[in-house]
Amino acid sequence: MQREVNRKTVMYGVSIVLLAVILTAICCIFEVQAQLMRRPTTLKTFSSYGELRSFLSKVRSPYGGWMWYGLFAEASSVLKAAPVSTLIPEHSTTNIQVAGVDESDVVKTDGNYIYMISEGRIVIVRAYPAEEAEVSSTIELNGTAIDLFINGDRLVVFESSNFIGWNLETEISVKVYDVSDRRTPILKRDVSLNGWYFGSRMIRDYVYVIVNSPAIRLHWNETTVNLPEIRIGDHVERISATEIRYVDFESYFNTFTTIVAINIYDDEEKLFHETILTGPATCMYVSPSNIYIAISKVPECIISPFATAKATRESTLIIKIRIDAGEITCEANGEVPGRVLNQFSMDEYNGYFRIATTTGYLARISKEATARNHIYILDGNLKIVGMLEGLAPGEHIHSARFIGDRCYMVTFRKVDPLFVIDVSNPETPKVLGKLKIPGYSDYLHPYDREHLIGIGKETVPAEERDFSWYQGVKISLFDVSNVEKPKELDKFVIGGRGTETPVLHDHKALLFDGKRRLLVLPVLVAEIDGEKYLRGYPPYMPGDYVFQGAYVFNVSEGGITYRGRITHIQGEDLAKSGWNFYSPYSVKRALYIDGILYTISDKKIKMNSLEDLKLINELEIP
């Protein structure tokens, strides 16, 4: 009897301890959310160099100050809608996220000329009319061209120069050229910043460039603060410690994020700039009025009062920077649980900021996946006012897109749930409907209010484990007119396992024009020769590369129609390098001017009729 009493006592004791642990964990989670709700919204400034150095010494990187910030650089993005005049033929614009906010790219057009990066230099091509296409000029650089803008008669080029040394330093130059005469570009402004190129946007006459640089410089056993520098010609301006803003939280990595605004037409106007001490920035969203920078953060939280170890809960810090005709003002900072995928997981609408995040991780072998997905809505001071949490347990976000009062989100582990979410009421976002189909979409693009285009991969569910084998590139057309029951109207699958398109990770590679119902994307196609495997083959077997070039489609409310494909890899180049994305003849972009489709690789531009895709002209890039 005494043993039974002791056993029950022990069981009761264990139950009380477990209950205390669970309640403490729940309280911890709610406390994290409560802290995020009451987070202060102002950024501080350092009073002196000594205070900055002391702050950095407390949060120094465990990797000894080596900062690999290139790993966190945002995939840069593309062409704004240019006004159409009688002197400029109708032409496509690059695939951007926000109207009026241009994104830099490796290829641009103004309707008469094409401006492109070819093997690290700039090439200006007279493109219209197609029959008279020719290279007008080239711009050789000391470093490597990585992105560009065109705005009337001003060409903006971003150039990267590497200096190999103890700190593996990089310098970014922003060069502004007068291209009134496309045959003889004239350098008008040259601004250099130390650090890694993170991204840029152009709004009217101002270019905003964001650069990351390591906050700590190591040389042998000496550690110093690596203050950001801005160089204009021979003049060098070092950002002082008292100009640097920061958010008071601990992080294992430390970066200076510097935002510089350059007037590309007024060469004498001073530069506007702001520097913030941050953690590793992952991506940014830019509206006509604000820049939002997302930064990964892992705060600490004690899960159990009986344990000495601490557990972590990941979150994302958001910094809001107001921009107005070049002026830059740090306005607020906020925080949400989870990590953000890319710029399309963020949006500003009617004074609110919306963001989709994922917490936890997948577990492909076991079934202990902890991933959850969430929507948070923040006010103008970046305070959370509404949330929708716990979507698609065990899956993670593959793509998201905010369009007006709706958010479309694709999660994936074994099948593809497309969620339609109502965000019209900032305080109470809610799921309206969802669709589960094989495959997933890595990029979502609006067709019209009732239709959505998804680009991703087809999949085959694994027979035993809880995941799927990805296959070819899949283009889907979704009907979302019935928000409770979205459906896949049509799909087109290119190739088999191993087929790739840069659109999956870089939206600027997509050409879509709703007026012409035109969709073009570069693809590297892999296929399996069925004659070699008459008894079939497993879904995990990759195919052999058989094609690289542009696939051309028409997309309408009725479905997706394949038009044809265009390649630049032919003859000796095909025999030499085969099909791949690394060939100088690999198609990387497509655009149209008037009724002509231009496909562009580093070494060639092909011009085909949009009506029947017949070749009209081709131009070798010297």
Image (cartoon, grey):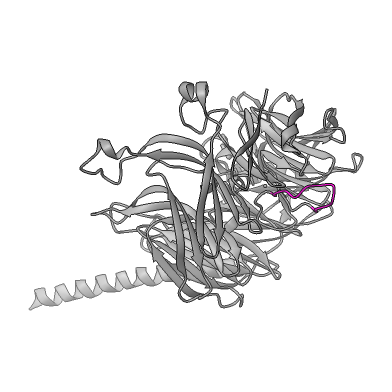
Nearer-the-camera pick, 527 or 47: 527
Q: Is residue 348 magenta?
A: no
On the picture, is 301 further left or further right than 11?
Answer: right
Q: Is residue 88 magenta?
A: yes
Give, as a single range, the part of the protein colored magenta: 83-93
Relative to residue 13, is residue 43 depicted above or below?
Answer: above
Relative to residue 360, is residue 187 depicted above or below?
Answer: above
Q: Quadrant of residue 616?
A: top right
Q: Position of residue 480 (x, y in %)?
A: 52, 70
On the picture, is 481 further left or further right than 189?
Answer: left
Residue positioned 32% across, 37% down in the render: 529
Residue found farthest to the left: 1
On the picture, is 121 further left or further right than 270?
Answer: left
**Is residue 312 visible to the viewer in this orientation of the structure?**
no
Nearer-the-camera pick, 71 or 186: 186
Residue positioned 65% across, 30% down in the render: 169
Nearer-the-camera pick, 35 or 1: 35
Q: Position of residue 150 (x, y in %)?
A: 77, 42
